[in-house]
Image (cartoon, rainbow, N blue to C red):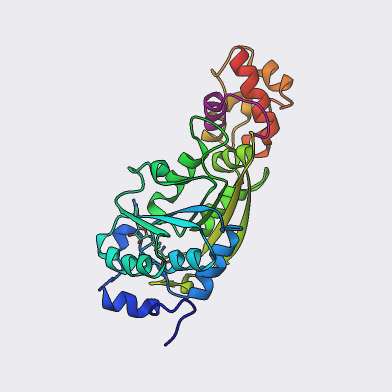
Amino acid sequence: MATIDGLPPLRDVINTHGLSARKSLGQNFLLDLNLTAKIARQAGDLTGCDVLEVGPGPGGLTRGLLSEGARRVLAIEKDRRCLPALAEIADHYPGRLQVIEGDALEINPLAYLTPPIRICSNLPYNVGTELLVRWLTPPEWPPFWQSLTLMFQREVAERIVATPGSKAYGRLALLVSWRAEARIAINLPPEAFTPPPKVSSAVVHLTALPEPRYPADPKVLERVVAQAFNQRRKMLRAALKGLVPDLEDRLIASGIQPTDRAETVGLEQFCALARNVKAS
Ligand code: SAM
């Protein structure tokens, strides 16, 4: 059967190369090339961009990124069984796909990429949040990437885009909204994957802001937010006890009532509190 890019259908690729899915590697593959092209389109205009893809697997999303015009794709894959399938894609798109075998948590991709850079991945769920937090907390801001288009479990996607007052609101939402614009771009049922995972998924699209929304020292902000949400149901005068002297005055000066709970306090107030704590 013909495919949109002239390469074999992904089911054939999986059979030819014996790519039975391994749970330990978070392998839930996308085999519909229309869907992978749709995800690639969520990443924005790829022409003129290098794209970093973590976990290409049999290459469905990789093919979407290339057919949607990415200048170059750098793909980091831990499972060496996938390399022959990825080599076929590299042959089909000469000079546009580089594959590195290894663990994305241990490889610094920067040496292989030329700006502008976008990141687009159907991430292995076991490393997804860790990679997102790393990409959001580089030593310097703006980061090396312009946008992140990433697949997460639905529940994690909701935590990424959550707003104050909702159950999903917490550290992740604050970290994200401090430095990026984020939205859920596509919701996907388990059946979209082979094999289907137990939970639904969502593609989240994040764009890096040129500078954080409000000034704050990243480490102090992280410390304040972590302590506040550690006991999210407690009033902040109790949850943040011991953080600084004169806590209640500092909360009020930051626009926060000492009786407020972390889950109702917005980013602007947390940043004001972080500045106040740092000044102390
Ligand atoms: N992108 C493919 C797709 O959409 O069909 C595969 C997605 S699958 C959810 C995750 C992929 O990440 C698998 O191919 C797996 O082998 C790979 N992987 C898992 N852990 C990894 C890691 N630490 N570094 C790089 N790749 C990893």
Q: Is residue 46 left or right of residue 19?
A: right
Q: Which quadrant of the figure shows ligand 1?
A: bottom left
Q: Nearer the viewer, residue 231 or 26?
A: 26
Is residue 113 shown above or below 189? above
Asked whether 221 falls inside the magenta stretch, the response is yes
Image position, residue 250 (x, y; %): 68, 18
Quarter of the N terminus within the rendering: bottom left
Is residue 178 shown above or below 93? above
Q: Nearer the viewer, residue 201 or 33?
A: 33
Q: Nearer the viewer, residue 176 or 207?
A: 207
Image position, residue 130 (x, y; %): 43, 44
Asked whether 195 falls inside the magenta stretch, the response is no
The residue positioned 49% from the left and 41% from the top of the image is: 135
The residue positioned 57% from the left and 15% from the top of the image is: 244
Magenta range is 212-226
Type of secondary structure dominating the magenta stretch: helix
Image position, residue 16 (x, y; %): 27, 78
Q: Nearer the viewer, residue 109 or 196?
A: 109
Quarter of the C terminus within the rendering: top right
Q: Furthest-front residue in view? A: 94
Q: Furthest-bottom residue in view? A: 1
Q: Is residue 110 left or right of residue 221?
A: left
The quarter of the picture where residue 91 lies is: bottom left
Image position, residue 74 (x, y; %): 41, 54
